[in-house]
Amino acid sequence: MAKSKSMKEKKPGKAETKSDIENKPVNISKKPIKLLVILVIILIIVDFLSLIFYIKPDFSSWKFNFVGSTQEKNASEYLQEGKCEDGTPFNACSDTLPLFCYNGELLDKAFSCGCPSGYVVEFQGCRRV
């Protein structure tokens, strides 16, 4: 078999030259990259789930306005009046504790507004005793 002139036989004890290193084929496997991408995706999912479980959001208070839904007033009318949906003026605690009216939106703010009887303050929400 004939060898090309660029491929020299390596003699024992001889150090590789720069041209030998540059001409050497590089075998890069894509398996570690795929594994790294999969691990990063799993990490993002676990972080997101742990954040949700840590915060424990109460989705029952979310209100969605769908097209064609009938309401007495829309949000812009409440903003013009300077009140929230339940009639609470801006920057005031609602009669329904622990809600606070902030720019037309009712938010849980138990630390400032307090909780109903039988409940204790837990960050900005209330927890039953």
Image (cartoon, rainbow, N blue to C red):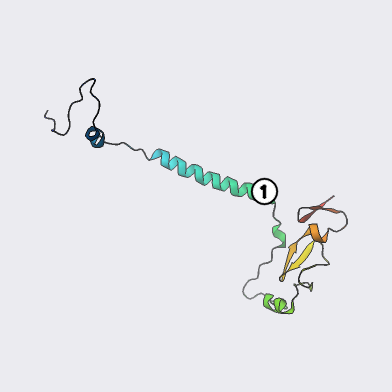
Q: Amino acid at mark 1?
A: Phe
Q: Position of residue 69 (x, y in %)?
A: 66, 74
Residue 36 showing in the rendered view: yes
How many tags in the picture?
Answer: 1
Q: Nearer the viewer, residue 64 or 76?
A: 76
Q: Does residue 126 sit above or below 28 in this rendering? A: below
SS for callout 1:
helix
> Residue at horizontal 36%, vertical 38%?
29
Does residue 55 appear to the left or right of 119 in the view shown? left
> Residue at horizontal 77%, vertical 60%?
109
The answer to which image quadrant residue 81 occupies is bottom right
Residue 71 showing in the rendered view: no
Q: Position of residue 100 (x, y in %)?
A: 77, 65
Q: Which residue is mark 1?
A: 53
The answer to which image quadrant residue 6 occupies is top left
> Residue at horizontal 88%, vertical 57%?
117
Q: Position of residue 3 (x, y in %)?
A: 13, 30
Q: Does residue 80 sit above or below 101 in this rendering? A: below
Q: Position of residue 95 (x, y in %)?
A: 84, 67
Crowd rating for badge 1 (residues with CA inside 10 Å; few <14, some 14–19, many 20+): few
Q: Does residue 17 sit above or below 80 in this rendering? A: above
In the rendered image, the residue lying farthest to the left is 2
> Residue at horizontal 85%, vertical 59%?
116
Q: Nearer the viewer, residue 101 or 16?
A: 16
Does residue 127 appear to the left or right of 45 in the view shown? right
Q: Nearer the viewer, residue 22 or 69?
A: 22
Q: Nearer the viewer, residue 5 or 74?
A: 5
In the rendered image, the residue lying farthest to the top is 12
